[in-house]
C-alpha cells in the first residue's frame, strides 16, 4: 500500500504524469484541485474570487487529509499545496512525495494561455511564475522523497524515471 503524491509548480505535469503512473500501477488517481471543484461545484478561480486564497487553502488541506488516507492512490496536488505547513506534514507522514521540478521558462510556456490559474492573472505572469518558483522550490525540496527533473521528454518517460527511482525508496507510509 502506497500513497504517491506528486508536487510541483502549476504546469509541471502532475496530472498528466499522475494519471499514467496510476494506470501503470493499477491504482486510483486523484487530482486534488479537481476533487475540490467536484465537491464545491465551482471552479478554482471562483473559489479564489469568493473565499480568497486562504479559503481555497483551507479546502485544499481538508482534501489532502482525506485523499492521503486512501491506500494505493496517486495524488496530483495543486502547485501551492506546500505553502501550508499542515499539508507538508500530511504529505511527509502519509505518502511518498515526488517533486516534478520543471524550469520556470517551461512552466510559463505551458501555462501562459490558461485562464484557470488565478495566481497567474497578473500583468506579468512570467515574473509571477519565477517569484512563485523561488518561494516554493525550497518547500517542495523539504518534503520530497524523490526529485524528478522535468520539462523534457514525454509523460511516459517521466513515469519510467519515477518507477525506477521508487525502487530505491524505502518509505511506504499509507494511512487507512
Image (spheres, helix red, strand yellow):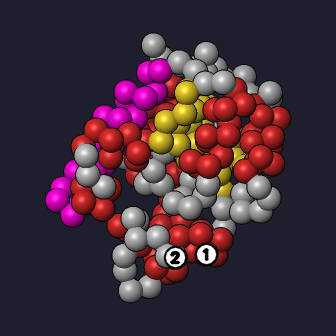
Q: Residue furthest left?
A: 50
Residue neighbourhood size for the residue with mark 1, other residues' Cα within 10 Å, grouped as few (<14), some (14–19), many (≥20): few
Image quarter in which the N terminus is found: top right
Q: Name the residue tied to disc 1.
A: 109
Above or below, 141 relative to 63: below
Residue neighbourhood size for the residue with mark 2, other residues' Cα within 10 Å, grouped as few (<14), some (14–19), many (≥20): some
- What is the quadrant of residue 65 in the picture? top left
**Label ID, residue 112:** 2
Helix, strand or loop: magenta stretch? helix
Check if mark 2's residue and mark 1's residue have beta carbons within 8 Å. Answer: yes
Q: What secondary structure is marked by label 1?
A: helix
Above or below, 22 relative to 124: above
Judging depth in this view, the residue of 53 and 49 nearest the camera is: 49
Q: What secondary structure is marked by label 2?
A: loop
Residue found 28% across the figure and 38% down from its top = 39
Image quarter in which the C terminus is found: top left
Q: Can residue 143 be seen in this view?
A: no
Q: Position of residue 79 (x, y in %)?
A: 48, 54
Q: Where is residue 36 in the image (x, y as percent from the top left)?
A: 33, 43
Residue found 30% across the figure and 62% down from its top = 45
Residue found 52% across the figure and 51% down from its top = 139
Judging depth in this view, the residue of 14 and 132 nearest the camera is: 14
Residue span colored magenta: 49-70
Amino acid at each position: 500500500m502506497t500513497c504517491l503524491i506528486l508536487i510541483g509548480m502549476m504546469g509541471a505535469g502532475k496530472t498528466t504524469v499522475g494519471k499514467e503512473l496510476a494506470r501503470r500501477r493499477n491504482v486510483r488517481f486523484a487530482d486534488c484541485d479537481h476533487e475540490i471543484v467536484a465537491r464545491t461545484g465551482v471552479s478554482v478561480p471562483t473559489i479564489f474570487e469568493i473565499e480568497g486564497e486562504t479559503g481555497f487553502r483551507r479546502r485544499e488541506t481538508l482534501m489532502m487529509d482525506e485523499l492521503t488516507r486512501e491506500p494505493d492512490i496517486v495524488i496530483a496536488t495543486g502547485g501551492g499545496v506546500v505553502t501550508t505547513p499542515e499539508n507538508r506534514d500530511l504529505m511527509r507522514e502519509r505518502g511518498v512525495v515526488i517533486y516534478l521540478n520543471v524550469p520556470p521558462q517551461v512552466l510559463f510556456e505551458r501555462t501562459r494561455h490558461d485562464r484557470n490559474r488565478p495566481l497567474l492573472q497578473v500583468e506579468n505572469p512570467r515574473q509571477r511564475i519565477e517569484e512563485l518558483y523561488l518561494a516554493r522550490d525550497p518547500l517542495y525540496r523539504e518534503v520530497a522523497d524523490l526529485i524528478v527533473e522535468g520539462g523534457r521528454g514525454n509523460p511516459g518517460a517521466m513515469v519510467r524515471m519515477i518507477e525506477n527511482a521508487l525502487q530505491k525508496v524505502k518509505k511506504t507510509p499509507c494511512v487507512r
